[in-house]
Amino acid sequence: MPEGTDDPALSAEGELALARLALGDGDLQHAAAHVAAALVQAPTLPEVHETLARVAAASGGDLDLFPLGHHAFVGAVVARAHLLAAAGRPAEGLDLLAAATGYAPGADWAGVPWVTAPELPERLEPERIARILMQICAAAPDPVPRRLRDPLRPYLTLARNAVTAHPGHALLLGAASALARRIGEVALAVTWAARGVRAEPTKLGEVWLGYAYRSAGQTRDALAALGRAVEHDPDDLAVYADIAGTLADTGRLDEALGWIDRALARDPTFDCAVHTAHRLRFQRDGDVAHLVALADFVRDHPDDSHEHADLAECCRSRPWLGQVTPAGGPMLDALRQALAAEGAARLAVRLDALEPPSAMRTVAAAVPGLDVEVAEVTDPDPRQPRRATTCQLWRYDGAIAAPTLPVPSTEAAERIRQLAHPAWPHPPAAYDAAVGLATLELTDLLGLLVHPPETPPTALGRVLAGQDPSLWVRCVQVWACLGLLHHRTDEPWAESTRRRVLLELVWGVEDWITEAALFALVTAAWVDPAVRPDVARAVAERLADVAAVSRERRVPIAASVAHLALATPALDEPTTALARELISGAAGETRRPGALRRLWRRLTGAFRRP
């Protein structure tokens, strides 16, 4: 679909002018190409259809002017659909329109008179109409977002007309119900599905009725319908998963898991049941082992019957499983206060203890001239690495930290600006996305950690730059460390450069980089079961060190490291208990400000990757 055109109708008029010139010269192929392009710009504009009719008349209705093929142009597909309808073959035309809708659901391909004509269904077999509606449903989200519903309403009009013309056809009623439900016409969906079941009780009809009842909030009726579907076909395990999901939505987890266990007893590898089982078990006890097992199943079964979102649903909005955790502390409180004041007052910050170097430098860059006074540097000295390391990223002059590494290359900065984001579906998805950094040099990846580039000129970048630059710095550090996971992947893990460097970062100066490097190690454990014991041991040792230091002084990264531990595969029980204890203690000390909470919802909602 074209982008950057301010006035689609004006662009379509330009294409039509070229089409008319080509028609005048007898060049039907070019005329057809321009009409197809105009259809993409304005699929319901009357002038487009008038010109299409002229091309059809001049060519004798030659369909080959709008060819189909493996890489067919969507405008040609739609033009061919209209010509088929005009030639008395509307069923074939509807098939093509449905395909176009699946390709570009936001375009009003079907908003034309012949699709919504009341007499059209009388010329079509009801089963054919049902199949077309099912094709539309298969390509549409469930439910369809409000902004995408209007292009589907002509199909709903077709469904209404079809139900009127064929009032007792069960398959048609069920398919019409499925479409109505997706675009928010829930009462109509219930009515049609119920009529379909009365006309002919079938498993599919009961499933459609169950879905309609569920969307209407009638859980008891939904479960009854889905139960009858199981009676029709006890071997359709997808219905078991639907029943389990419906029960879970009402808090009846034990019953839900009972249905899943019944399904798994019949087929332990059935993908819908496996996904639902792990999701519900995680929902019950919060043990990340269920999600790791689900990720393993997804990796080992790439050819599932259809796409599932259970893993992403469970990880969404959870610290480190689906998003970077925002940092806190007095320096960042001052930063947010300064940004909210828009320079109206000069701020001064008095710190009882030294903050992480990334926090200090982020605030200094965002609020030049901020007065900062550090009362004392308490022991254990946060300026010193927690273990001996050859990877020193910071040097200190008193309380002032400066990077030891040069600025990364322009290419590295641009790559991370295109990739860095505060949210991801789940750790394996973050790992896959970071492959775009695989060819960067090690010095560039390390340089990005201490020299984050400016935010990108995107909606996300503008929000972060204006409201919380610290979150952008954390994004860059997280994705740079994920990039380290793709560095020299031919090296065996135990002796690899990527493992050595990440561990040195983990044990370096107490900083946001510690968290980023730990997340990279945790992600490695998610995608490679062979490294899980090694990573679990490293996380346990680092958390134990955080806990020990916390008994002497405040550790700003303690809660985040604890959340990372809870996201770690194969972590031992004592370390898990320690992580929960640290999180519980931190929860009593800090509360995320309301403004920051609203910003985070905006970032992880409006800017979430699909």
Image (spheres, helix red, strand yellow):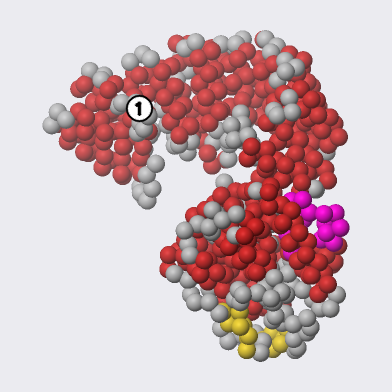
> Where residue 422 sits in the image (x, y, percent)?
61, 59
Would you say residue 461 is visible in this rendering?
yes
Disc 1 crowd, CA 10 A, few/some/many (<14, 14-19, 20+): few
- Above or below, 447 against 66 in this view is below
- Which residue is pictured at 61% across the width and 83% down the height? 395
> Where residue 520 sits in the image (x, y, percent)?
64, 59
Look at mark 1 in the image and give the residue it sits on.
Answer: 69
- Which residue is pictured at 71% across the width and 74% down the height? 387
In reply to whether residue 574 is colored magenta, the answer given is: yes
Find residue 164 and report its image quarter: top right
Q: Is the magenta stretch mostly helix, strand or loop?
A: helix
- Above or below, 129 against 420 in this view is above
Residue lying at the far left in this picture: please name it: 25
Classify the position of the N terminus by image quarter.
top left
The span picked out in magenta is 561-579
- Which residue is pictured at 74% across the width and 72% down the height? 556
- Above or below, 28 against 599 in this view is above
